[in-house]
Image (cartoon, grey):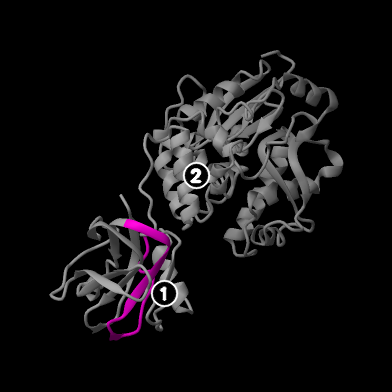
Amino acid sequence: MESNYNVVLALRTHFWDQYIEYIAQKLNGSTSLCDFVIVADETNSTFDCGSYNKVSHTSDISDLGIEYLPEFNLWYNGDYPLYVLMDTYKDADYFIMVENDVLVNKNIDPIIKYVYENKIDVIFYEFDGTSGWAPEWEQTLKESFDVTKKCFFPFLLVSRRVVEHLHKRRKDIASNYKNGQIKEFPYCEGFIASAINEIKDSINISSLEEFFDIHHFTFTDPYYILDPEANKFGSICHPVRGHDFSSRRYINEVFIENSILRKGLSLIDPNLFYENLFERVKMMGDLDKMIRFTDIAVQNKWILRPEPINWALGAKAWTSSISSWSIHDTIEAEGAAACDGNINKDYAFHTSEEQSPSLTIELDRNIQCRHIYIYNRLSFSERAEKIKIETSIDNLNWDVVASYREGIAFGGSDGNPLIITLDFKELRYIKISLLEENIFHLVQVEVYSQ
């Protein structure tokens, strides 16, 4: 590092994997003027970060004069690693802290030189008032600051004197909170900005967009870390994630060919995302979307053959009654909950105690049915044992396809639903009822033609 510059560039992370290593490689390669280090939150476990220098810390930094408040973790106190870095690098003039879901896509040496030449003290993003910000976070600031501000700091450059000010304020506030003088402990994005605002007239502040293309620097909407758009030269991208990025995108994007989700998925082994994606689409409870998704999955070779279609997904349905234990206000809403694709709940509907309570399902078309899956409630499952299943084309004439007058024990999400096998029987309506006077409740019904 050139002797005129004394800057610490720190990647902040609480774990290590191939994707964090990729971010570290890019960040380390972005400068020849900084000392690069991993500032590692090892509150829960230690981890190996290879050949990189590591500064380890936990959420307890009481040795640096800040009262330990175990009710607030490092996600809440994102400024704490700055004080650890300041204590470790006692001669550093500047600290740059980058979170582990940020891609820095340019050489930052010109920024370092600019900072020294112009005596810049802070570079961060969206230094603004808290109006319209999350009310619960804004509330944490009001006891400690006359003027409340907020910022967005996945990338943060600060001079030593700014860190010293933040450290002093954090010590005082933590002590006041510990002693009961204040009731709220400031959330970091508000604390950093509000504390810097107190000294804004004596320091020089710059905004991140003066140095980077920030079109992909947002709170949400992650990119896949290897997406070329996330790695566009001159930009800074946040958030980026590994193959699990799809779980953070809006699921409707899967139906848009050129969406960020679809572009990212094209770069990932389907074995790493398909099962999760399929479950999310199923949970939408929309038959047409399930069919479209299956077509897309085959076309993109995520799967080799179409998924079996649950023709009951999103179907109209109704129960014979509702009760004080019902989740919904109408028999139609109660019934529809048994066709929403979610088998991981206590129950979908709950009738009154009556003679032969029932659930009736109307598919949106006639099908040649091969299997009916019935998912029982795991608690009180015995209530559904004396069960009868009927089918119809017109909701007038019914055929009994299964009847268990002596009772049959079955489960649901435990992997033991009741499966009724038919010989490709044409049907549109299914009625499931009890053969006795009782309370009736189920979790889900699925209908397949395969």
> What amino acid does circle 2 point to?
Ser
Residue 247 image label: 2
Q: Position of residue 95 (x, y in %)?
A: 67, 30
Q: Position of residue 53 (x, y in %)?
A: 52, 23
Side of 379 where 19 appears, left or right: right
Q: Position of residue 352 (x, y in %)?
A: 35, 84
- 1 or 2: tag closer to the N-terminus: 2
Please, what secondary structure does the residue beneath circle 2 have?
helix
Side of 151 where 330 appears, left or right: left
Image marks 1 and 2: residues in contact by CB distance under 8 Å: no
Q: Position of residue 55 (x, y in %)?
A: 52, 30
Image: 261 above or below 418: above
* Front residue of 382 and 30: 382
The answer to whether residue 342 of the structure is visible from this angle is no
* Front residue of 153 and 53: 153
User: In which quadrant is the N terminus drawn?
Assistant: top right
- Find the magenta span and give its range: 344-368
Please, what secondary structure does the residue beneath circle 1 have?
strand
Asked which quadrant contains residue 264, the reply is top right
Instruction: Kindly identify the residue that appears in the image at 62 percent across and 21 percent down.
Output: 35
